[in-house]
């Protein structure tokens, strides 16, 4: 089995178990994890709060003012949904968790309306 076939099979398995999320939601979450890891001086465990914040940054960088719309199209309506995606990835063996990691770590990290609309960084990027 090739890596690509494994990835496709894993995405299909994830979507069968969690049909409320589009396949791109899982890929985005993994990209957000990579985005956060790139900011670290040394590799370490990433908290739910850190990952959710990194996902917000990445969504704004990639999709600008459409970030909330894109995420919601994929089934991501709250930071709790990000946690559900993470734990689905853990359940299928793509990610690993530490003993004290909980889905609740993602609960109410930020409000989507505030983060992507009222709190959107409208200023020019440096």
Image (cartoon, rainbow, N blue to C red):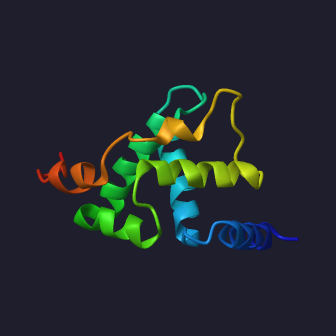
Q: Would you say 20 lies left or right of 120 here?
A: right
Residue 8, compared with residue 100, is above or below; it is below
Residue 48, compared with residue 120, is above or below; it is above
Q: Where is residue 74 in the image (x, y as percent from the top left)?
A: 47, 70
Seen from the viewer's position, the closer of residues 119 and 75 is 75
Q: Would you say 31 lies left or right of 116 here?
A: right
| Tally of marks | 0
Q: Quadrant of the N terminus?
A: bottom right
Q: Quadrant of the C terminus?
A: top left
Residue 68, compared with residue 86, is above or below; it is below
In the image, farthest residue toward the right:
1
Q: Which residue is drawn at 48% across and 41% down?
A: 106
Q: Please tell me in which quadrant of the rendered image residue 85 appears.
A: bottom right
Q: Which residue is drawn at 39% across and 41% down?
A: 108
In the image, farthest residue toward the left:
123
Q: Where is residue 110 in the image (x, y as percent from the top left)?
A: 33, 43
Q: Would you say 18 lies left or right of 58 here?
A: right
Q: Which residue is drawn at 70% across and 67% down?
A: 17
Seen from the viewer's position, the closer of residues 122 and 116 is 116
Q: Which residue is drawn at 22% across and 64% down?
A: 65
Seen from the viewer's position, the closer of residues 12 and 123 is 12
Q: Where is residue 40 in the image (x, y as percent from the top left)?
A: 49, 30
Q: Position of residue 12 (x, y in %)?
A: 71, 74
């Amino acid at each position: 089995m090739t890596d690509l076939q494994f990835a496709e099979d894993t995405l299909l398995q994830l979507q069968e178990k969690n049909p409320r999320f589009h396949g791109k939601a899982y890929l985005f979450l993994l990209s957000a994890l990579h985005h956060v890891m790139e900011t670290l001086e040394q590799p370490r465990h990433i908290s739910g709060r850190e990952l959710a914040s990194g996902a917000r940054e990445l969504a704004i960088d990639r999709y600008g003012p459409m970030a909330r719309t894109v995420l919601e199209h994929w089934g991501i309506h709250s930071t709790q949904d990000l946690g559900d995606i993470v734990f689905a990835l853990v359940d299928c063996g793509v990610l690993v968790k530490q003993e004290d990691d909980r889905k609740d770590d993602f609960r109410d990290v930020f409000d989507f309306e505030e983060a992507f609309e009222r709190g959107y960084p409208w200023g020019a990027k440096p």
